[in-house]
Image (tube, rainbow, N blue to C red):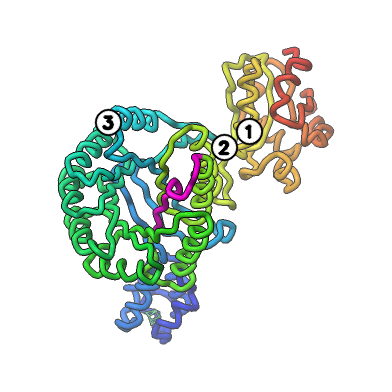
Amino acid sequence: MALTGIEIYKFLPKTNCKECGFPTCLAFAMKLAAKAVELSLCPYVSEESKQALEAAARPPIRLVSIGAGERRIEVGNEVVMFRHEKTFYHPPGFVLRVKDTDPADAVARLVDEVAGYSVERVGLELRLDGFAVENESKDGGSFFKCVELVSSKIDLPLILMSEDPSIMGQVLEKVASAKPLIYAATKENWDKMAELALKQRCPLAVYEPAGLGELAAVVEQVTGAGVEDVVLDPGARDFSESLSTLTQLRRLALKKSFRLLGYPIITFPGEAATSMEEEALLAGQHVAKYAGIIVLDHFSPSMCYPLLTLRLNIYTDPQKPIQMAPGIYEIGSPKKDSPLCVTTNFSLTYFSIAGELESSGFPSWLLVCDTEGLSVLTSWAAGKFDAEKIAKTVKEFNIAERISHRSVILPGKVAVLRGELEEELPDWKIMVGPPEAMDVGGFLKQHWVG
Ligand code: SF4
């Protein structure tokens, strides 16, 4: 955990000499805690204190990148056990596993299907993040062919899975520039795998199922050899074991500052699941607690959409809902006599009503008020969505110049605002729409005369 100003102050000389540009050591410590200044501004910090402060400033869970380029997966650097304490920062990467014993045409089809899969939700494009290729055949040639096939079709992060360092070394010679994750160093092969990771500058997974003490021992060996980017596989596979082991790992990293286990975790929900549905459930558990990379063994849109949505929800900052920019939005190709609806700038609210308007057959204008990302009822209850705000937004975006009528449709849940809005916009007709977005099409059919 990051140190507080008071904790940092204990390491400073406490002479208040002002040479750092601050009136007191405490003032300097506070700025350091806020990461607004560098420790080097104080010339009198002892070597011992410097080391302690620098060690404490390192993130408790190392940020590790897998892959190169824009679609690389960045995981780790989390600072809390529970999302509501602050936020979770780096969503786990979803990776699909293929095996070098699978027929090449089936692998090619699957890669194409996954590469072409994306869904849009609240204005964001949700997709899977990469592939894991497993050397199930134990044959170097088959492994190489399969890796080559996958990487020739996509530019996504890869995980190379082979227990044989010489096979891994041959394949890495061809694909190391893509910075794949090497899976995995074990008690038996850690020295050779660490050598490869260092030579090719790739992250290295450490697999050790015998317990966290044993896992930490292998991590100590590979980090001692110079590998910095490590991913942990504690071997926990089923619901109960993976929940307790992953929670222990997060606690040890955050609460006990146990550096050897302060790395992101890779999971394999398909290995304990008896069906695709169970795999999805277990993967969902790993999204919440506390995987960095989730390797799936099955792909289907009906499995992936809920997982991607869950990941989006868990990794959205609870204090900063996903928001739309306030303004006037065109749904379909509205004309001057098209309906004008008003809503808030909470993304989910916006996309619910926008989707319903789109399918209603009524091209419309949708006026979005700045409610700091809160939904209709919540923002109304918080005093952020009232008649004054709506009237101000109507005027701010000059909507009157774009339409030929003077009617505005309020969300039914805030029907109570009608009277006040009539006072704020005396030349307008204030209509009250349905409470639920799904009923807006029926409402327009019944009440909108243009
Ligand atoms: S230079 Fe160092 S000792 Fe002097 S006031 Fe700043 S923090 Fe304190």
Decide: is 6 above or below 294.
Answer: below
Identify the residue at image location x=23%, y=61%: 189
Q: Which residues are magenta?
A: 264-276
Residue 98: which quarter of the image? Answer: top left
Rendered view: 49 above or below 336: below
Residue 312 in view: no
**Residue at left offset 76%, top offset 37%:** 387
Say whether residue 170 is left or right of residue 331: left
Left or right: where does residue 1 sit relative to residue 350? left
Residue 410 x/y as whole percent? 74, 30
The residue carrying mark 1 has its beta carbon less than 8 Å from ligand 1: no
Of pointers 1 and 3, the one earlier in the residue sequence: 3
Task: Between residue 180 and residue 444, name the one nearer to us.
Answer: 180
* Side of 408 relative to 326 (left or right): right
Residue that carries the numbered disc 2 in the rendered image: 324
The numbered dot on residue 104 is 3
Tell which quarter ligand 1 is in.
Answer: bottom left
Picture coordinates of residue 155, whole percent (x, y): 29, 36
**299 over 1 or under it: above or below:** above
Residue picked out by circle 1: 368
Q: CA distance from mark 3 to mark 2?
A: 44 Å
Tag 1–tag 2 contact (CB < 8 Å): yes
Which of the labelled discs sits on residue 54, or is there none? none
Is residue 178 magenta-colored?
no
